[in-house]
Amino acid sequence: MSDVDGPTVLLIDDEPPIRRLLRTALAAHDYRLIEASSGEDGLQQAATRQPDLIIVDLGLPDIDGLQVIRRLREWTATPIIVLSARGQERDKIEALEAGADDYVSKPFGVGELVARLRAAWRRVTRGNRPEEPVFILGALKVDQAHRRIFVADREIHLTPIEYRLLTTLIRYAGKVVTHDQLLKEVWGPPYVGQSHYVRVYMAQLRRKLEENPARPRYMLTEPGVGYRLAAE
């Protein structure tokens, strides 16, 4: 392992080729890597080594990756990114509902995984500072203290629900948020399962905030799962 000072990543994956690939790739991006080839080993490493970020495969040889995530979430808020060949929408939703922060399907691009790790680490470091009242992403500026939104210095009017939807996405910037989580936080628990509400209001938000609503830069769709606000 190279001598790096970046965040420590715990990789829980039983595939030697994946571990070899990430051993090299993450060191090149200044991450320190801890490896575990089973769920139980991963849980022990998480408890004793206290990593900054965790990558979990769902198909582990001893216990299911979903169970690993649930057991981790009993005691740690460390960001968890799932890296798995199970690419169905239901698999992604189950992992996110179990407590994962993000999901990358195998086969995967190293660049995408590193970008997701970087976004997760930014959320951690931002969480150690007082919350910024002004959120800036490209040309988008949200002044939460005064409830004012600007795109390229042009003020945009949002309805109360549009504003709640936007600020909820901001709170989880860089993280996949499921349809049901958005419904629960923006509309309330009785609306869980009514995902058409989210789609309608997300389309309205994009028309107001995105330069090209058909190819959004800020509010990204995770097909069948939910949405993610870009973190950079």
Image (spheres, helix red, strand yellow):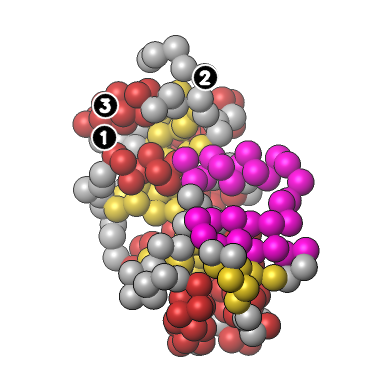
- At x 49%, y 83%, the residue is 204
Spatial CA span between label 3 and label 2: 20 Å
Nearer the observer, 195 or 11 = 195
Which residue does the numbered mark 2 point to in the structure image?
5
Residue 20: mark: 3
SS assignment at label 1:
helix
- At x 39%, y 14%, the residue is 2
Q: Report whether 109 appears left or right of 153.
A: left
Are dots 3 and 1 in contact, CB under 8 Å?
Answer: yes
- At x 50%, y 56%, the residue is 138
Residue 155 image position (x, y, % from top left): 62, 73
Does the image show residue 141?
yes
The magenta-colored residue range is: 118-145
Task: Single out the mark in the foreground, 3 or 2.
Answer: 2
The three-letter code of the residue at mark 2 reads Asp
Which residue does the numbered mark 1 point to in the structure image?
18
The image quadrant that residue 166 belongs to is: bottom right
The image quadrant that residue 124 belongs to is: top right
Residue 41 image position (x, y, % from top left): 45, 31
The three-letter code of the residue at mark 1 reads Ile
